[in-house]
Image (cartoon, rainbow, N blue to C red):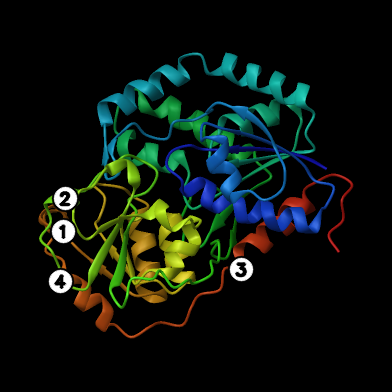
Amino acid sequence: MHLFVDISSHGFGHLAITAPALNALAEMAPDLRLTVRSGLPRQKLAQRIKPPFALIEGSSDFGYVMIDATCIDLAASAAAYRHAHAGWPARVAREAALLAALEPDLVLTNVSYLPLAGAARAGIPALSLCSLNWADLFAHFFGHESWGAPIHAEMLAAYRSARTFLRVTPGMPMHELDNREDVGPIAAIGRRHDLGLNGDKAVLIAMGGIAHQLPVEDWPRTPGIRWLVAADWQCAHPDAISLESFGMNFTDLLSSVDAVITKPGYGTFTEAACNGTPVLYQRRDDWPEQDCLIEWLRRSGRCHEVDASVLHHGDLRESLSALWRQAPSPTPQASGASQASEKILSLCPGFAVS
C-alpha cells in the first residue's frame, strides 16, 4: 500500500493531526509505503510520524501569510492567493503528472487542495483530513473581493473532488462540503514525568509553529512558578528554563507541566485536553477556526482566556489561580486517529479492513 501524504507547514497543527492517523494506519497495514511532502523539517516530521517515510521537501500550500502566531498579513495573503491561482490549470496538470509518476494507491492531504485536484485529474482516489479547510477561510477573508469568487470556486471544486473530507472533532462546520465525514478528536497521548522542580509549578509557553515570542525576560517574578520557553528565545529571566533541557518530546512535556500558555490551535488544544493539562490562551485576531476550538475546550478541559496585554506584562498570578481552581473535566478520548485510519484503508483499492 503506497500512500502519498501532503502535510501543510502552516504551523505544527496539521502535523499533530496527521501523524497519529498515520501511526494508527501503520499498525493496521504493516506493509505501508509512505511518501510525505511537507515544508516542515524532516526532524520535526520524524518526531511525530513513527513509520519510515520518503520525504519530498516542499509546500503545495501556504495557508496564510502570518505576521506572528495570532495575526494574519491579509494584503500579502491576498497577493499570494492571486498568484497561486493565476495559472491554476497548469498547476493542477503538473501536480497530476507528479502523482502519476509516484503511483500512490491513495492521496491524503492536510489540508492542501492542490493535491486533491491533481489526484482527481490523474484518476487517483484522495481524501483530506483536518479541522478546517482553506476554502472556508478564504471565503471569510476574501469572499467579498471582486477577484475572490473564481479562486474560491477552484478551491471548493478541489475539496469536493476528494472521496471524503474527514472533519476532526472539534472542527469548523464546512457546510459547503457534502463529502465531509466526522471523526473524533485526534491527539497524541504523552507520559507524565517528574520535572524535578522541587515543588515549583511548571508553565509551558507554546505559541505554536509560527514565530511568536513573548517578552518573558521582562515579566515580574512569580514565586513558585517556572516558565518553560524555547531555547532559541535566549530568555534571561531567572525563573525561565529551556524546554529542550528536559530532553522530552513535546507531548510528554505537555503532559508533565501544570499549565500551558498558547493560542487557539488544534494540536495544542486537543493534546492538552486529552492529557489533562490546563490551558491559558490568548485569542487570535479574526481566525474563524478558533470559536469551535474554544467551545470544545471549555467543555472538555480546564481553560482560561487572557488578554494580549496580560501576556505582554506577564502578571499572570490571578489568571493561573483562576485556571487551577477549576474542577477537572472528564478526559476526552482521542478516538479520531483509529477512525481516520480505518477510513483511509477503506478507500485503498484492494485492501479490506478487518
Mark 4: secondary structure: helix
Disc 4 to disc 2, how far (Cα)?
16 Å
Amino acid beneath label 3: Ser
Q: Earlier in the sequence, mark 4 or mark 1?
A: 1
Query: How many residues crowd around disc 3 within 10 Å: few (fewer than 14), some, or many (20 or more)?
Result: some
The reply to whether dot 4 and dot 2 touch (C-beta < 8 Å) is: no
Q: How many marks?
A: 4
Disc 4 to disc 1, how far (Cα)?
14 Å
Q: Earlier in the sequence, mark 3 or mark 2?
A: 2
Disc 3 to disc 1, how far (Cα)?
32 Å
Residue 266: horizontal and vertical position, in percent?
44, 56
Q: Is residue 261 above or below residue 85?
A: below
Looking at the rendered image, the quarter that the C terminus falls into is bottom right
Residue assigned mark 3: 335
In the drawing, does residue 353 fall left or right of residue 36?
right
Q: Nearer the viewer, mark 4 or mark 2?
A: 2
Please give the name of the residue rendered at 57% of the width and 29% of the height, measured from the top-left corner.
Answer: 114
Amino acid beneath label 4: Arg
Q: Earlier in the sequence, mark 4 or mark 3?
A: 4
Residue assigned mark 4: 317
Q: Earlier in the sequence, mark 2 or mark 1?
A: 2
Residue assigned mark 1: 307
Q: Earlier in the sequence, mark 3 or mark 1?
A: 1
Nearest the viewer among 14 and 109 is 14
Furthest residue in direction bottom, as rendered: 327
Please give the name of the residue rendered at 64% of the width and 16% of the height, measured from the top-left corner.
Answer: 94
In the drawing, does residue 67 fall left or right of residue 100?
left
Residue assigned mark 2: 217
